Image (cartoon, grey):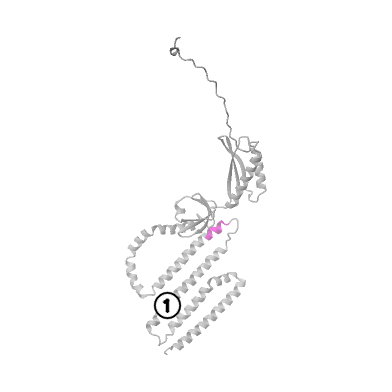
């Protein structure tokens, strides 16, 4: 039986109403299940928009393919089907991407980064962020490929493109060598556990934290709020310091040049008093020793420990300020360094008699 435009419109309207009812039912069921299983609610929030769009587009596509009005010319109807095919590919890609991102976020929720020992959580977060970018790129690439294959002209050109793929791959590899090297370096950094998000590093003599790690570059948040952006390949070719490679606990040094007469035992007692009155010290280790005695001074080195790099910096400043104040208050007992200069009186000059040959007879 021939389908009129009115029949098509009624069928489409009825299908959309049924789809709307189905979407509402799914939303209500997901809300009820979320009260008992929070993960269901998280899934509903993550994929709700993509699911609704996918349902609407698929219903319209099915109605268009099964009910074609005779009043519409074939070429126009083919254009409508092409648009719906592209919309279906985009909606499916969006829904699949949202679903994959949901599972990635689900893995992140199991590990907290707001605890003192968060090394495993930061490692997982770094890897998941890289996988997320790869997932999005892969889904977009597949969707674009499927969309291009929807055009008959692209299918015809495909044979010639495949025939020249060998030469093009060589040329492309040479042209994009540095870019591809950075991409593979980013993947290597993420899965080799060399650096992680929030790791404390010293790069090019600058202290900072890993703020962002992508496939092509790494962002280091420096101590003065500057951002140092480096290619991922830098961290596979150049040396750098990672202060939180295994644990976040660190030991730092404070050095003072003092006079030879300094009371080392008194200085050590003052160090114990400073550490006992501050919450910055984690109680693991502390020591004070004279490590050098040259150039008219003795060098005193203090080692203290803290839970992380920022706390250690504050603790070192606190210890340095306290010991400098002690040295100032005990200046007479050798607290402050002194430069000693000994003034020696010159020896008296001896009378030198001229040689006899130079003496003129009178």
106 w.r.t. 281: above or below: below
Quadrant of the image for the N terminus? Answer: bottom left
Residue 358 seen from this side: yes
Quadrant position of residue 148:
bottom left
Q: Residue placed at 67% from the left, 47% from the top?
A: 276
The percent position of residue 212, horizontal first and vertical second, equals: 51, 59
Give the residue pinned by disc 1.
83
What residue occupies the far top of the structure in this picture? Answer: 362
Per the image, label 1 sits on a secondary structure element best described as helix
Residue 308 seen from this side: no
Q: Residue placed at 40% from the left, 79% from the top?
A: 79
What residue occupies the far front of the structure in this picture? Answer: 362
The percent position of residue 11, horizontal first and vertical second, equals: 48, 86
- Give yes or no for residue 116 being in the magenta stretch: no
- Image side of residue 162 versus residue 109, left or right: left
- Quick one: 117 or 37, which is closer to the camera? 117
- Quick one: 357 or 289, which is closer to the camera? 357
Quadrant of the image for the C terminus? Answer: top left
Q: Residue placed at 42% from the left, 77% from the top?
A: 83
Helix, strand or loop for the magenta stretch, by majority = helix
Quadrant position of residue 224:
bottom right
The percent position of residue 154, horizontal first and vertical second, equals: 36, 72
The percent position of residue 272, horizontal first and vertical second, equals: 66, 44
Q: Residue placed at 56% from the left, 59% from the top?
A: 121
281 w.r.t. 77: above or below: above
Residue neighbourhood size for the residue with mark 1, other residues' Cα within 10 Å, grouped as few (<14), some (14–19), many (≥20): some
- Image side of residue 265 versus residue 122, left or right: right
* Magenta residue span: 118-125
- Image side of residue 109 versus residue 70, left or right: right
- Quick one: 334 or 207, which is closer to the camera? 334
């Amino acid at each position: 039986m021939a389908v009129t435009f009115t029949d098509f419109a009624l069928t489409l309207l009825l299908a959309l109403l049924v789809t709307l009812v189905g979407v509402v039912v799914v939303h209500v069921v997901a809300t009820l299940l979320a009260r008992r299983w929070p993960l269901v609610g998280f899934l509903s929030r993550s994929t709700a928009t993509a699911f609704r769009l996918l349902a609407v587009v698929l219903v319209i596509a099915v109605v268009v393919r099964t009910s074609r009005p005779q009043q519409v010319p074939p070429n126009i109807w083919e254009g409508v089907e092409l648009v719906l095919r592209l919309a279906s590919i985009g909606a499916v890609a969006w829904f699949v991407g949202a679903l994959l991102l949901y599972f990635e976020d689900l893995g992140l929720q199991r590990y907290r980064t707001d605890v003192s020992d968060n090394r495993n959580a930061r490692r997982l977060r770094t890897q998941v962020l890289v996988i997320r970018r790869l997932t999005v790129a892969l889904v977009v690439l597949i969707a674009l490929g499927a969309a291009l294959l929807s055009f008959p002209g692209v299918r015809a050109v495909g044979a010639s493109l495949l025939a020249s793929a060998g030469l093009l791959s060589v040329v492309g590899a040479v042209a994009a060598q540095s870019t591809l090297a950075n991409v593979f370096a980013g993947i290597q950094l993420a899965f080799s556990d060399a650096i992680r998000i929030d790791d404390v590093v010293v790069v090019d003599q600058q202290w900072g934290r890993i703020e962002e790690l992508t496939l092509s570059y790494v962002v280091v948040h420096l101590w003065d709020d500057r951002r140092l952006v480096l290619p991922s390949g830098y961290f596979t070719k150049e040396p750098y310091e990672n202060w939180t490679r295994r644990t976040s606990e660190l030991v730092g040094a404070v050095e003072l040049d003092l006079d030879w007469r300094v009371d080392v035992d008194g200085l050590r007692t003052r160090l114990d008093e400073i550490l006992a009155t501050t919450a910055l010290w984690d109680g693991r280790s502390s020591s004070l020793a004279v490590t050098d005695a040259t150039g008219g001074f003795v060098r005193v080195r203090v080692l203290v420990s803290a839970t992380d790099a920022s706390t250690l910096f504050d603790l070192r400043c606190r210890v340095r300020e306290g010991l400098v104040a002690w040295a100032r208050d005990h200046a007479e007992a050798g607290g402050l360094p002194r430069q000693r200069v000994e003034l020696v009186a010159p020896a008296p000059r001896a009378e030198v008699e001229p040689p006899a040959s130079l003496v003129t007879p009178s």
